[in-house]
Amino acid sequence: MKINQVLYQAVLELKEKGNASPRLDAEIILAHLLDVDRIFLLVNKDQELDKSMVEKYKELISRRGKGEPVAYITGHKEFMGLDFIVNKHVLVPRPDTEVLVEYIAEYIYTNQSGQRLNILDLGTGSGAIGLSIASMFPHSKVSLIDISRNALEVAKENAIQLDIANVQFILSDCFENVHEKYHIIVSNPPYIPAKDIDGLQIEVSIHEPRKALDGGLDGLDFYRRITIEAREHLLNGGLLAFEIGYNQADEVKKLFKENGYLDVLVLKDLGGHDRVVVGTFIFS
């Protein structure tokens, strides 16, 4: 079969399964399988594929049709211009999270440029946040923490393949095994209310790790814990920065203020939704 023929069939199958972006997903998966870019598929649409390749492709499309994220099928996801390894042990990095990283970068350039900073990425998963920051500020030290040993292994793989050396990895339930103080603590914690998880898109509810999603009854469990415990691990004037759910800004701002954080800001993502809350902690 020719490239355009297998793509046509794949798009039809994904449409029948209710896929929201059948053409894009079909092309990304085939390009991954052939180890080419998507332009190659257009330019070489009449190229014949051998039977074994067609069968492998059909298997991957079947997985996508069942809701498995494209990033898990290809094993990769771009974030902040970097290519991250991902698998079922970590959440798929999302563009909205780049707002958090971009704010941290702007904050460092504006307030602490040239300093060797100590930075903590709490609940690092694939390492997307912490490694992106570490890559931009190679003279700083970034600690990547997760409760999941499997997630930390993914983050370690990413550090190696991205050639990022100014990092350390700590297996810990929040701050349990943390013994340092930091200029910046950043976190994208689990924030989905437990009752809402099963109603999410199948890509998330079935395929992404539930522990990385479940924020307790109201989704705020980790924000409560981290805002309190972070005070013992921030240097004077240190910054705490969270990614939040679109409807959680007011509650998280309240937690910041109740726990003595100052200069609390809410930042929006490209869709205009509240996405990040930040604040500084100054010892009284």
Image (tube, rainbow, N blue to C red):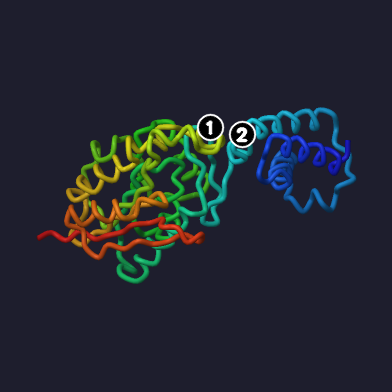
Q: Amino acid at mark 2?
A: Gly
From the viewer's perspective, tell me whether residue 78 is left or right of residue 12. Answer: left
Residue 110's image quarter? Answer: bottom left
The disc label shown at residue 120, or none: none
From the top left corner, tell me how far across and down residue 227 is, in percent: 24, 49
Which of the two residues, 198 or 284, is positioned nearer the viewer here?
Answer: 198
**Which quadrant, please, contains the C terminus?**
bottom left
Q: Is residue 52 above or below residue 145?
A: above
The disc label shown at residue 207, or none: 1
Q: Answer with mark 1 or mark 2, whichever residue precedes in sequence.
A: 2
Q: Is residue 118 visible?
A: no
Q: Amino acid at mark 1?
A: His
Which of the two residues, 124 or 189, is positioned nearer the viewer here?
Answer: 189
From the viewer's perspective, tell me whether residue 34 is left or right of residue 221. Answer: right
The disc label shown at residue 67, or none: 2
Residue at 29% across / 56% down in the picture?
Answer: 184
**Which quadrant, please, contains the N terminus?**
top right
Residue 10's image quarter? Answer: top right
Q: Give the SS element for disc 1.
A: loop
From the viewer's perspective, tell me whether residue 82 is left or right of residue 250. Answer: right
Q: Give the SS element for disc 2.
A: loop
From the top left corner, tell me how far across and down residue 57 is, in percent: 75, 33
Which of the two residues, 53 or 245, is positioned nearer the viewer here?
Answer: 245
Contact between marks 1 and 2 (CB within 8 A): the answer is: yes
Residue at 43% across / 40% down in the picture?
Answer: 125
From the viewer's perspective, tell me whether residue 43 is left or right of residue 184. Answer: right
Residue at 53% across / 39% down in the picture?
Answer: 86
From the top left corner, tell me how far across and down residue 179 is, in percent: 21, 43
Q: Residues within 10 Å of mark 1 (few under 14, many from 20)?
A: some
Q: Is residue 85 visible?
A: yes
Residue 236's image quarter? Answer: bottom left
